[in-house]
Image (tube, grey):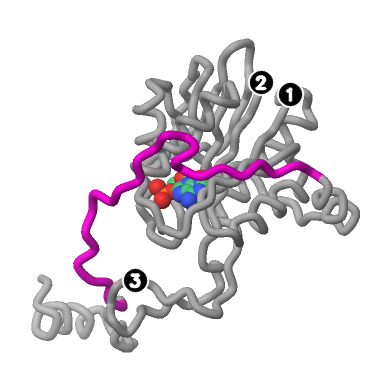
Amino acid sequence: MKVLVPVKRVLDYNVKARVKPDQTGVDLSNVKMSMNPFDEIAVEEAVRMQEAGTATETIAVSVGPAKAQETIRTALAMGMDRGVHITTDEDLEPLAVAKILKAVAEAEGAELVLMGKQAIDNDYGATGGMFAALMDWPIGQYANTLAPGEGTIEVKREIDGGLQTVTLKLPAVVTTDLRLNEPRYASLPNIMKAKRKPIEAKTPEDLGVDTTPRLTIVKVTEPKTREAGVIVETVAELVDKLKNEAGVI
Ligand code: AMP
């Protein structure tokens, strides 16, 4: 089956996010950017499917500025076959990304779209569901284990309190959770090889997708800093503090 993996370039997960002074968003100037960690897991899974012979072709797609090419190159260095770069300087909303992914999935004839459960920059966790709805495809969210079958894929999903197993009829969408696999590091020869793999560039306009924003960001603020905790000596002291200081019991 042909597998499409959307990969987003985001703030590296080790970097502490700083809010821009005008509170319009997160300051991305001069900070390390990387592939969204959940997307790395999706890439790893696609490459493993290719190695196992269940994926016939693996395509990485990224929607973003010129530098998003680096993210596609990382996916290619991990072992994916080729890339599609949808160029835009806007930080697009999930619905716009989902519409773009629909156009790409249709053009490519993708049978499985493996994506992250959420992008760690905005934490929307919305694109997978919107994309599945636009395609009218089944979706298995928060995948812990995947088992491709004949025209189907079995997904063990992480849910509150355990794992739920569902079988999806292909074509389908799967979103990855942390425990699905541990992504590999790209080896130097594979990084070199990836430089020769093709990346096709298009714009949202080429795909006929209207990306006009529908949301207005009112303001972005830092989370409140947490006050330091205290260690209590006895249960009685804890109960007293909860009752008389915190007022929660
Ligand atoms: P979100 O709904 O923004 O939390 O993103 C969920 C998933 O959608 C990500 O893990 C990616 O797989 C995919 N995605 C979101 N935005 C983009 C983008 N700009 N380019 C490629 N994939 C994206």
Horizontal relation, residue 69 to residue 95: left or right: right
Magenta stretch encompasses residue 214: yes
Do tag 2 and tag 1 residues touch (Cβ < 8 Å)?
A: yes
Name the residue beneath numbered marker 1: 56
Magenta highlight: main SS: loop
Relative depth, front residue between 160 and 38: 38
The CA distance from mark 2 to mark 1 is 5 Å
Regarding residue 36, the answer to whether it shows in the image is yes
Relative depth, front residue between 204 and 167: 204
**Where residue 88 sits: x, y (%)?**
48, 54
The CA distance from mark 2 to mark 3 is 39 Å
The amino acid type, in three-letter code, at marker 1 is Thr
Magenta stretch encompasses residue 227: no
The CA distance from mark 1 to mark 3 is 40 Å
Q: Is the residue 103 above or below the residue 222 in the image? A: above
Name the residue beneath numbered marker 2: 1
Q: Is the residue 159 above or below the residue 39 in the image? A: above
The amino acid type, in three-letter code, at marker 3 is Gly
Tag 3, which secondary structure? loop
Name the residue beneath numbered marker 3: 25
